[in-house]
Amino acid sequence: MDFNDSQQEAAFRKEARDFLEANAEKRSIISDKPNDKSPQIAVAGAPETVKGGKEAAQEALERAKVWQKKKAEAGFAAILWPKEFGGYGGSPIQQVIYSQEEHDYLVPSGYFEIGIGMLGPTMMVWGKDEDKKRYLPKMITGEEIWCQLFSEPSAGSDLAGIKMKAEKDGDEWVLNGQKVWTSGAHFADYGMIVARSDPSALKHKGLTYFYLDMKTPGIEVRPIKQISGTSNFNEVFFNDVRIPDSQRLGGEGEGWKVALTTLMNERLAVGDPPGLDFDQIFEATKELEVEDGLAIKNSEVRQKMADWYVQSRGLQYTKFRSITALSKGQTPGPELSISKLVTASKMQDVSAYALELMDSSGMVHHDQNPVLKNLFQNGYFFSAAMRIAGGTDEVLRNIIAERVLGLPQDERADKKVPFNELPSGKN
Amino acid sequence: MNFDFSDDQKLLRDQARKFLFDKCDRKSVRTILDDDQLHYHKELWSQISEMGWTGTAIPEEYGGLGLGMLELCVIAEELGRSLAPTPFSSSIYLFAEFIKNYGSEDQKKKFLPLIASGEKIGTFALSETNGTPKPSNVKTEYSSEKINGYKSPVSDGETADYLIIAANSDNKGNRNSLSLYIIDLHQDGVSKTSLETIDPTRPACSIKFENVKAELLGEQGMAWDMTENIFNRAAVLYSFEQVGGAQVSLDEAKKYSMERFAFGRQIGSFQALKHKMADMYVKIELARSNAYYGAWALSTDSNELPVAAAGARVSASDAFNYAAKENIQIHGGVGFTWDYDCHLFYRRSKLLSLNIGSTRQWKENLISNLEKRNIV
Ligand SMILES: Cc1cc2nc3c(=O)[nH]c(=O)nc-3n(C[C@H](O)[C@H](O)[C@H](O)COP(=O)(O)OP(=O)(O)OC[C@H]3O[C@@H](n4cnc5c(N)ncnc54)[C@H](O)[C@@H]3O)c2cc1C
Ligand SMILES: Cc1cc2nc3c(=O)[nH]c(=O)nc-3n(C[C@H](O)[C@H](O)[C@H](O)COP(=O)(O)OP(=O)(O)OC[C@H]3O[C@@H](n4cnc5c(N)ncnc54)[C@H](O)[C@@H]3O)c2cc1C
């Protein structure tokens, strides 16, 4: 056992580190800059809470685009993608190495992951050559941002339950209906969408998949205010939106298969967000006072910290096991399927406990404390989203139970019946 | 990065698993459980000794196989899976490690070959009263070359030939007044009293010492430091046993839940149970990864060992305790019967998480070692 890079891995790591050192600022465990605008916690599609309204959000977006361009020029924006589309043509292990290195730097995140991580790979599998040439390079450079128009009011976990209508009219399709929770739709240039082209077919058979320009007439984006107070996701309404058949990915009625390509990549794209883990609360407990002195000296605090430490490091070492498989050219086992499930709840528990330790000043959601900032207050809200987005805790447990452990599938009421005869709720 | 066991080590694991599957079935575990007169599985002990498992990490010059700690980790996981009723942990993870790391040349020559061959069994005892052992509650004394005092519980004390204990060498009851002594248990003045444990396949006794001869192990006044180090080493090995036991608890819960029907369906199709088993899986994978890290630290003599060992230990205790109790739960009423095997794992999980220090003690160790590491 060792943690050493192979010669090539070490060379790549140096390349990555040199680039980051020259272009980005190192992250401290808890940022000590009171007005630091760099994101501290973010996941795919949910840039960090940007306070200060539209202008600040626009500024953050521009900063992110500048950074993305640099990263793309250096080749690190899409390490796994072929060179012809502007990727690095690299291996999974190189992707992991770059991510490990970037983790230590304050760089914008939350804008491009959905495109590069999920939608680009879908286009690579299902798109025509001219589509790939036209769209993929600009996805990497951040010049064009993409969003994922999947969830609807009546279809989230049960994605195949979507109702968005797609009707064929000559060589055009007409879309009518509503999408919801679409992260980044308010700044996205393009989107990928699943719609129901045949309501009389079985639920998973009547779907078709498209990409579209978000400026197509008939699309209306309305930001939704989140519990964090900011708006990163949206409702998107479609009123007689006409798109050419050439924007279809996969065959008519094959939309579920195409969507699965996207979803398979989602598990990889939703990585571990930096910035709120054991290390942060460990730092905090060295400064916060409780009834008997510094929090870190209190035995209840120490007991809890130990639990989070073993979760945090347990995940890190689990990743090392997967990386080992990758670096031997093998497919990693299913062990990484636990990652988001553990991370999201840990973040929620850590945040809530940190607020407890602050006692009544934990109530204050304000940049007053220059050291702790709002890290834990933000985390308290943000973690609630993490447990839902990209597969809820419950759905992830089902996946582990059924696909990893091989337990029986849930009994389902929706397998053999045409979609338009299925029971549905008030949505 | 190579964060995995080697192909040879995996081969050893497969062989050990197959061997224990044949020779250490549940029936043989139960023979020890059901008979108070039997303290361990003698036949199994001599077979695994013959194969050299007891000497895995003991150098060849002292009669061992001279393999490494990683190989010992591999064997530990298999012993944990099979619930092997042997004094392996006491004699190998503790006694042999104490002698190997702190014994004089003469002591190594004298004890290690006997331990490596399985001919003799050693153990270690620290505790004398209820609660967390600390220097001030060690009352056993060494003076005029004799030990007087009492230790309890002593794991595998009934079967052991040798014992290492901590005793006061200058009667002050603080950390630096404690030294380690090796005692030959076959002498006058040693009296043993059997104790029933929560897992009778892993027995313990109390031992009284009246003017008993003993020899010093390691440096005078260093008992606590040496014990901490050997406990760290043992904690990694224990964590592999625990991961092994946890995995089998999950496998058996899963198997039962697929065979048992209620409300017209397999109970394994109820989400309440599926989610429990998913949670078992999560805890086990975290524990396995933490144990691997411990194994790395142990096998490379890294100064990360105190943190890595405590992390492995805390995570593994959590995984095995959870898997064992939910395994009973998933079995319903039959899980509470003597006949079903669930209780064997339930017993073992708690016993393992108390031996060499409770989980709360290891959590405390973990955080204090993290603090120390930060200062350095
Ligand atoms: C911050 C954020 C960003 C998002 N971004 C996007 C995006 O960019 N694009 C997009 O398309 N979607 C996005 N989503 C939507 C997300 O994918 C869905 O919210 C998620 O899949 C859950 O669906 P739902 O909200 O409809 O909840 P439901 O599916 O209605 O779930 C409600 C509750 O029921 C439980 N449940 C549902 N089915 C089962 C089951 N089979 N077994 C057990 N429990 C079950 C769930 O776990 C949950 O607790 C985002 C969501 C969030 C929170
Ligand atoms: C100490 C003790 C004393 C008892 N005394 C008596 C007595 O005096 N008289 C008597 O008649 N009975 C008695 N019982 C039996 C007791 O009522 C049953 O054990 C209990 O109802 C569970 O049934 P089961 O053992 O068949 O388990 P099962 O019903 O097979 O359950 C196995 C597992 O499946 C789960 N499960 C089952 N159905 C569902 C579901 N729909 N959704 C989710 N999970 C499910 C259970 O929660 C359990 O985890 C006793 C049991 C014990 C342990």
Image (spheres, rainbow, N blue to C red):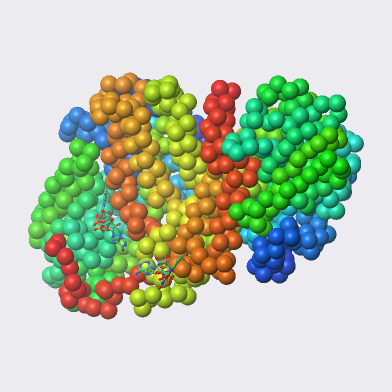
The x, y position of residue A25, in whole percent, is 41, 27
From the viewer's side, name the closer residue of B259 and A58.
Answer: B259
Q: Residue at x 55, y 42 (%)?
A: B359
The x, y position of residue A125, in whole percent, is 37, 62
> Is B285 drawn above or below residue B271 in the view shown?
above
Tell me: B363 left or right of A35.
right
Tell me: A303 left or right of B62.
left
Tell me: A392 left or right of A243.
right
The answer, for residue A282, to whether it is visible in the render is yes
Q: Quadrant of ligand 2?
A: bottom left
Q: Residue at x 66, y 28 (%)?
A: B135
**Quadrant hosting residue B234:** top right
> Is A210 drawn above or below residue B269 in the view shown?
above
**Quadrant hosting residue A289:** top left
The x, y position of residue A378, in whole percent, is 29, 35
The answer, for residue B78, to whether it is visible in the render is no
Q: Residue at x 44, y 53 (%)?
A: A338
Q: Residue at x 76, y 47 (%)?
A: B192
Q: Quadrant of the C terminus of chain A?
A: bottom left
The x, y position of residue A328, in whole percent, is 60, 53
**Quadrant hosting residue B354:** top right
Q: How many marks?
A: 0
> Is A358 drawn above or below residue A95 in the view shown?
above
From the viewer's side, name the closer residue of A376 and A267.
Answer: A376
Tell me: B54 left or right of A36.
right
